[in-house]
């Protein structure tokens, strides 16, 4: 089971450099084994609301998440202490510490291009590494 970081979704949604690799990952992955945090969802929503472009965000929510069975994970109020513990322990920003805490709480590996996770116990997994042995 995996927690997919915000930057992975944005690669495709913003047609960035690694978009083809990420598209291939999503086409090959068992979507019910993937999760997104509510924080990632909000962050992506903020980006597209700022641009007054709801289409890509609503496609993500309705077609890519809801229809696929991908889970949306949240933290409980009592987990917020853990966020700040991870900020201190791993020198993470709040958003990365939130992602890490969600992954930690749910026993998930992190799929991310964010090198800050390399300082953590969980580290990170690249989307292209998950199917390398099957290509």
Image (cartoon, rainbow, N blue to C red):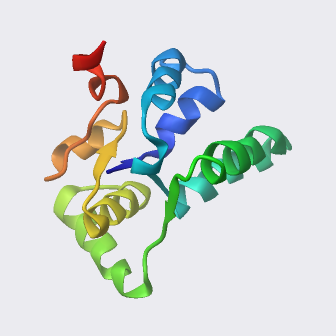
Q: Position of residue 33 (x, y in %)?
A: 39, 49
Nearest the eye: 41 or 67: 67
Tally of numbered discs: 0
* Left or right: where 69 falls relative to 64: left
Residue at left 30%, top 55%? 92
Q: Is residue 13 visible?
A: yes
Farthest-out residue, right: 52
Nearest the eye: 92 or 52: 52
Residue at left 37%, top 54%? 96
> Within the image, what quadrant is residue 41 found in?
bottom right
Farthest-out residue, left: 121
Q: Position of residue 65 (x, y in %)?
A: 61, 49
Q: Is residue 12 above or below residue 114?
A: above
* Left or right: where 89 falls relative to 20: left
Q: Is residue 34 visible?
A: no
Q: Is residue 15 above or below residue 124?
A: above
Residue at left 65%, top 54%? 66
Q: Position of residue 131 (x, y in %)?
A: 30, 23
């Amino acid at each position: 089971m995996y927690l997919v970081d915000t930057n992975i979704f944005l690669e495709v949604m913003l047609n960035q450099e690694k978009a083809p690799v990420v598209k291939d990952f999503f086409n090959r992955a068992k979507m019910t084994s993937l999760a997104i945090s509510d924080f990632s969802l909000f962050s992506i929503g903020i980006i597209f609301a700022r641009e007054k472009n709801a289409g890509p965000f609503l496609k993500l929510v309705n077609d890519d998440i809801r229809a696929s069975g991908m889970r949306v994970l949240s933290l409980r109020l009592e987990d917020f202490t853990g966020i700040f513990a991870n900020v201190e322990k791993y020198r993470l920003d709040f958003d990365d510490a939130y992602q890490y805490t969600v992954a930690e709480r749910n026993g998930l590996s992190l799929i991310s291009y964010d090198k800050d996770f390399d300082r953590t116990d969980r580290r990170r997994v690249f989307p292209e590494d998950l199917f390398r042995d099957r290509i």
